[in-house]
Image: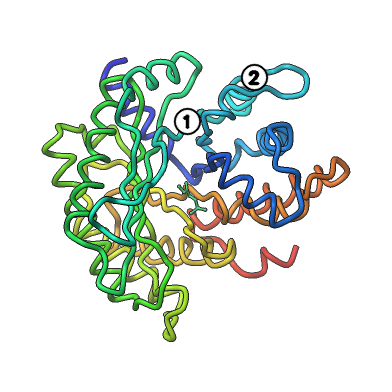
Amino acid sequence: MNAQELIDTARTLVAGDKGLLAMDESNSTCNKRFAKLGIPQTEEARRAYRELIVTTPGLGECISGAILYDETIRQQKKDGTPFVKAIIEAGIIPGIKVDTGAKDMAGHPREKITEGLDGLRDRLKEYLEIGARFAKWRAVIAAGDGLPSRGCIEANAQALARYAALCQESGLVPVVEPEVLMDGDHTLERCREVTEEVLRRVFDQLYTQRVTLEAMILKPNMVLPGLTCAKQETVDEVADATVRCLLRVVPAAVPGIAFLSGGQSGELASARLNAMHVRSKSPNSRLPWALAFSFARAIQQPALEIWRGEESHILAAQQALYHRASCNRAARRGEYNAAMERI
Ligand code: 13P
């Protein structure tokens, strides 16, 4: 695949008012979410849930790309149609999570390093053959309580950049996801400081590892106060802090930024994304990159809670999934409002 094809794919993923759907929970994360709702933690239940998602009517109106997990990209609908084929027929580009998880980092208590570089070139080749056109790697950074350490930021930034370089060599667009976690009582200002530092290190490494910025997507957290911080800023304050931080550190050559939701409610994630777009409409506030979404929980959670493993709930769950996806589509136009939630 040549560089122009990668650039075109990256642009398509963030074009217009669409965004990405992350449905790449590892088996253990998916099982944990199922267990909370009393859904059996089996391969068949995970397959049935993913079939519900990929067959949601109209999903391609709101979703440009779907991130799959290794198990999912090999699965099929009950009628034997591979999920990858069903996704492409829905007008959605298939992607794949390729890291093998965040593991305890030696010498760095309470911090994680994401693994998965060994053998990655061969795995990327196989995923490309199956039909994936982009890939995702998530690094997690804890903020607050003396964290993060320089060692954790640097090791994760370098791994992200090496992954991204391998993706581009293999013909896949890298989605580079350094996530500053919401857990803890740190302030919004602390999140901004850590997010800015992490993104600076990530872009330093992307440059050092010769990654083509025009052919990647950044998937960052929004700049938010910790979940248990006493002061919770308004939607507009979060939107302003997030955009200001990104403008300082994300080069204009990057075609798009697609936020993770990170544990925010679906409504708040939509409202905050919407506020960023409302602000960017004024002539002095034009943004150099597309601002999109790449949510898992903030799109899927209501649907999962309705489905609960029951075949008779599938249609209602699909409606809930479509609803959240279309709220985020509206947010990308700056046209989302709370009234949409009362339908
Ligand atoms: P959330 O939107 O639930 O944070 O998930 C996004 C994701 O892809 C995590 O890697």
Task: Name the quadrant containing residue 226.
Answer: bottom left
**Of the residues shown, which amino acid type is indicated by label 1?**
Gly
| Residue at 54 percent of width and 43 percent of height | 25
Residues packed near mark 2 inside 10 Å, few (<14), some (14 to 19) or many (20 plus): some
The quarter of the picture where the C terminus appears is bottom right
Q: Earlier in the sequence, mark 2 or mark 1?
A: 2
| Residue at 46 percent of width and 61 percent of height | 273
| Residue at 85 percent of width and 40 percent of height | 311
Residue underneath mark 1? 95
**Image check: 28 left or right of 250?**
right
Q: In the figure, 180 relative to 241: above or below?
A: above
Q: Position of residue 58 (x, y in %)?
A: 68, 38
Q: In the figure, 147 relative to 85: above or below?
A: below
Q: Nearer the viewer, residue 257 or 193?
A: 193
Residue underneath mark 2? 82
The quarter of the picture where the N terminus appears is top left
Q: In the figure, 196 relative to 209: above or below?
A: below
**Of the residues shown, which amino acid type is indicated by label 2?**
Pro
Q: Nearer the viewer, residue 59 or 21?
A: 21
Q: Position of residue 43 (x, y in %)?
A: 68, 32
**Image check: 90 left or right of 37?**
left
Task: Name the quadrant containing residue 137.
Answer: top left
Q: Nearer the viewer, residue 270 or 304?
A: 304
Residues packed near mark 1 inside 10 Å, few (<14), some (14 to 19) or many (20 plus): many
| Residue at 23 percent of width and 69 percent of height | 193
Q: CA distance from mark 2 to mark 1?
A: 14 Å
Q: Secondary structure at mark 1?
A: strand
